[in-house]
Amino acid sequence: MIVSVGVLKGSAAGRVSEHADQGLTLTVRVYNYARVSAEDMATAERVATRIFQKTGVELSWVDCPLTRQEVQQNPACQSSHTPTEIILRIVPMFPQGLGLSPSAMGYALPTPPPHRGYLFSISYTRAQAQLQETQGLTLGQLLGHGIAHEIGHLLLGTNSHSPAGLMCAHWNANELVLAAYGQFNFSREQADSIRGDVRTRTKEQEFQQMAEVAAK
């Protein structure tokens, strides 16, 4: 989960993608229940994409409709998720009973091994509250970092907070200002683990596709 960010100077993490695999992609299905503006969502997706590009992983975004009638018109949002697809729900606020810190902005659903996490949520209300304590950072930028953090939990594991950097559990105001300048990234070690997880997801998906072809 995410409350606020520790700082990681961008130099080392920014060079991670120099040795990255080719063709590693995750698709993010977005369900915008909080009705975040198109401008802020575009910024959030751009920020999260940039952060993951530095790890050598591309993010592909699919904006999913919220009504049954609209879903029927969007095949990409109808099928069951595949190993390389994850689901983002932006909700107005979290329901009671999750046991989250009052300032936690995001929540990645724990998934026991060998299954891989695929579902996470961001609270729009808590993001707005966090933004009031921050200077120099837009809502879209904050959401983008929160989204990247929670995807990190899906790929690195639920208990994957770090003392500093994007995966730090608590972000303070000074660190969030640095986020506005693109200084929050995964560490080199985290980037290696992220690529490893996405490689495994990709192989699992290829195996599923071959099995489906063989069954026909």
Image: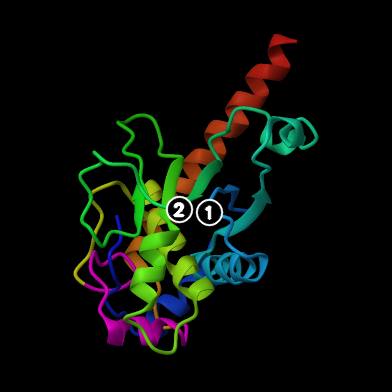
**Position of residue 202 in the picture relative to residue 118 (left or right):** right
What type is the residue that disc 2 sits on?
Pro
In what element is the residue under mark 2?
loop
Q: Earlier in the sequence, mark 1 or mark 2?
A: 1
Q: Is residue 212 above or below residue 119?
A: above
**Residue 114 painted magenta:** no
In the drawing, what numbered circle is on residue 34? 1
Most common SS among magenta residues: loop
Residue at left 52%, top 70%? 17
Q: Residue at x 24, y 73 (%)?
A: 164
Left or right, 161 with reference to 69: left
Q: Do the residues bearing badges 1 and 2 touch, measured as CB atoms within 8 Å?
A: yes
What x and y, as percent, mark residue 168? 25, 67
The region drawn magenta spans 164-182
Label 1 crowd (10 A; few <14 / some 14-19 / many >=20): some
Residue at image x 60%, y 70%?
Answer: 46
Q: Is residue 166 located in the magenta-colored stretch of the structure?
A: yes
Give percent across and percent down for residue 51: 49, 70
Q: Which mark is residue 42?
A: none
Q: Amino acid at mark 1?
A: Ala
Q: At numbered mark 1, what does the secondary structure look like: helix, strand or loop?
A: loop
Rendered residue at 34%/62% (across/down): 190
Q: Whole-Å distance between the Cαs marked 1 and 2?
A: 5 Å
**In-front residue for pair 67/44:** 67
Q: Quadrant of the C terminus?
A: top right
**Is residue 186 visible from the viewing direction of this image?**
no
Q: Residue 170 at what x, y percent from top left?
A: 23, 69
Q: Which residue is mark 2?
A: 92
Q: Is residue 110 visible?
A: yes
Q: Write down the quadrant of residue 67 in the picture.
A: top right
Q: Which quadrant of the figure has residue 119?
A: top left
